[in-house]
Every structure is written in structure tokens, then in C-alpha cells.
Image (cartoon, rainbow, N blue to C red):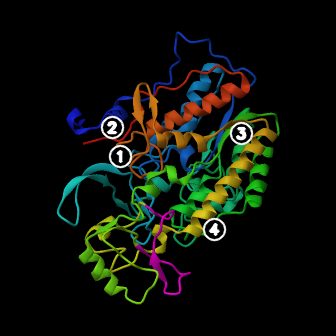
Amino acid sequence: MKTMSLSRLSLAAVSLALLAASCTPDLHGPEPKAGDADFYRTVAIGGNYMAGYQDGALYMKGQRLSIPALLAEQFKLVGGGPFSQVLMPDNSGLGLNSKPWESWFITASHLGNKTDCKGVTSLSPLKAQVSLTAATPYLSGLAGNSIQDFVVPYATIADYFNPSFGDPFSPTGNKNPYYNRIASTPGSSTMYSDAKNQNATFITAWVGMEDIFNYAASGGTNGTIPSPATFSMYLDSLLQGLTANGAKGVIANIPDFRNFPYYTLVAWDNANITQGQADTLNDAYAGLDNIHFAAGRNGFVIDDPSSSTGLRQLHAGEYITLSVPLDSMKCNKYGLLVNTINDRYALDSTEVYEIDYAISQYNSIIAQKAAQYNLAFVDMYSYFTSVKAGIKWNGTDLNELFVTGGFFSLDGYHPNQKGYSLIANKFLEAICSKYNSVIPTINCMDCDGVKFP
């Protein structure tokens, strides 16, 4: 792929392609030292963010430049040992499709020209569906390997302790294809047991994200969020086991969902219509007191099982996910007249409350457990708020804007490689503060941002 001319890119987008991570120390800085921690045998455990999942998929380069892999390179400067991963076979990767009725799997997204329903051609994220047969090379297990990277996309904290989570992928059984590939004994071992058996001297953990965001990404239709008490019980078991032999470590908390373009790009009131269009819609919904349109911006109409009519308009403080069929909204009056927006594409006020409550409670628990087990604590809730407001790195402005903001990948939820490298630096900052370590920050020259054709 060639790089677009500077006239076609914002500064942030250009910088995304140029600013990337080299994991080499600043030769003019202080001498690296381990401080009060032992980095010789490190183990990582977590979900999507720790795996380097991005652009809607797990792929080789994303794994090689994931948070724990980047940290492991820096740890080598202070006595860190090997950090082995089970990598995907290529950079097309394999992602779980949020619309499994279309296909179970998809490739990683890339930017390309797409013609929408109005005949307008523009750059847009493009991905391909992957059949079960075509997914076979990505599903092959590598049991028995000695690895230190126990990160599994979409794994909830309960999954860490579930032997069945290592079963082969099945549309009628285990619908997660990722742990089976790395399980020491598929169907018997667990993420927790595999990680514990490494007898780590240092652990890197980021847990709880999937417990909340598997629910949020589905518009609140994918199960329920585990209670804070349940989360606390599992987290205590996890940390107690992994630190039983004196291991130090670092753990991160959970960001606000409002800091992800996946939940904010499509505004709840983006139905911008004329008075004539409003009159037509009001006639169509005559007799429904909870639906009314006027000239200007209006809330879209959504399915709502709790409403007496089964539908209503969105209001301020509610959200539409980026998985909503955008072409149908543009051309087929989806969310206005022909079809109301399916519940799986919207977060209503009740679901928003549940998500906010869970994040608040989980974050309190994570902070408490970090103190209890003497772990460094990374405040990702605050950091992602800073990203949304705008941050600078090496003189470049970065923010949460979709495609051009410089931080997020093409799925609107996961960071790109540059974003992950900046998050890894926040982990280093917390580690150095907690353990009196001196570890150079990451300036990743190999990390990609959003690539433009």
C-alpha cells in the first residue's frame, strides 16, 4: 500500500503512520534497573486489549506489538526473560463477527473505497466474511507449548477458570476460538491454571473489560454483567494464585464506554429532517405518545420491549453502536419509518446505568485488590478520558476520533498499534512508580496506525 499525499490526510492521521514504536532505551537517560520487582519470568493474562485485538480481529502483527509483548521487550532491559506467544498465521487474522447470522468470522478491516447506497464512493473500513472451512488454519490448537501470553479475546473472568473454554470452536458449543489454540491441555486446563503453572515472578493483568463490554457491544442483549461480588470473587482467586510465590505485577482498571467511537460515532439524535418529513413521520406514528418528530435533529426510533407499544424514540443519554446497519439508515429509513432500530444496536438508559454501575464497582474492586496484593495500578479510566480530550505524543495530537484521531483502530473500540504502545507506556509508568524501577518508555517505530491506501 502506498501512503496518501499530505494534502489528503489530517496531521493526526499522517502521524499515525509515522510515529511508531522501537523498544530501545534512551541512551541519554538513567541506567535501567529492576528496582523492587523481578521481571525474569513474566506472564500476561487478560482479554481483547491485552491480546492486541484491533481492526475487528486478532492477527500476527497486532499480537507481536500487543501491550504485554511490548512490555516484555522493555523488561529485557532489566533482567526480563523470554516471552513466548502463540501467533496467528498471518495479518488477515480472524475476528469474531458481531453479526454471526452473516458469518461466524471476519478478517481484519482495512481502509478502501466503498460505494454506499446513495452511490457515493469514499474511504471506509472494509472486511471479508470467513467461512468455518476457511477459518481452519486459524483454529488449529497448539497444545503443550510453554508460553507466557495467556490473553484471550472475549474471555470473561469466569472463563479463566472454565476447562470447557478450551474446547474446539463450535457453533453449538464453545463459541470462542482463541483459548483452544493456546491451552496446554484443551478441555482440561484453564487460562488460570496455565498461567499459574508458569510460576511467574511478574504478572501483567487487565481483566473485567470483557465482562462489561461483551454486554455493552451487543446493546445489552448478550447475557448479563456479572455482579460486583462475583467479579471480586474471581479476581481474588486469580490474583491469590498468581502471586502465591511472591510475584509482583501490574493491573489496570476499566475505561468509560463513552470514550470509544464505537458508542458515540452514530449520535442518538442524528435524524436531521425537514418539517415536511416530520409531518409524514408523525402521521405514520399517529397515536403513539412517545414518538414525535419536528424539523431539525430527532431521536431515532428503537425497539423497546419495556414500552407498552414495543418501540419508542431514543433520548439524550442513550447510544447507538457502530455495528448498526449504516446503509439502511442512510437510504431505507432504518430507525425512522420502515424498520425501527433493533435492540442489539442501542443502549437504553437502563442498560447505560447497568454499564456505568458495573464499571464503577469493578474499578473500586480492582483498586482494592491491587493494594491487597501489592500490585502496580494503572488508571485506564482516567487515561481514556484524557485521550478523548486530546493528548500529545512526540508533538503529535491524538484523540478518540474515528479513523483520523490517531489512537483507535478501524473497529472503533480497540486501539491501533500506536494506541496500544501508548497504553503500554502507562503500564510502565505505574510499574516504575510502584517498584522504584527505571525502564525506558516505548517509542514504537514498527507500530502501525490506520493505513491509508
Magenta stretch? 301-321
The one nearer the camera, 29 or 384, is 384
Q: Where is residue 241 in the image (x, y as percent from the top left)?
A: 79, 45
Kindly identify the amino acid type of the residue bearing the numbered disc 3. Answer: Gln
Residue 111: x and y in percent read: 30, 48
Quadrant for the N terminus, please.
Answer: top left
**Is 341 drawn above or below residue 375 in the view shown?**
below
**Which residue does the numbered mark 2 point to in the structure image?**
13
Residue picked out by circle 3: 198
Give the crowd class for mark 2: few <14, some 14-19, many >=20 residues within 10 Å. many
Inspect this view and state whether residue 300 appears. yes
Gap between marks 3 and 2 measured at Cα: 40 Å
Q: Earlier in the sequence, mark 4 or mark 1?
A: 4
Question: Counting residues from the N terminus, which is met first, the one under dot 1 or under dot 3?
Answer: 3
Q: Are marks 4 and 1 in contact (CB under 8 Å)?
A: no
Q: Crowding at label 3, few (<14), some or many (≥20) Cα neighbours within 10 Å?
A: some
Is residue 347 shown above or below 445? Answer: below
Q: Which amino acid does label 4 sit on?
A: Thr
* Count of number-bearing discs: 4
Q: Which of marks 3 and 4 is nearer the N terminus?
A: 3
- At label 2, which amino acid type do we have? Ala
Q: Which residue lies furthest to the left in this view?
A: 119
Mark 4 lies on residue: 224
Q: What residue type is labelled 1?
A: Val
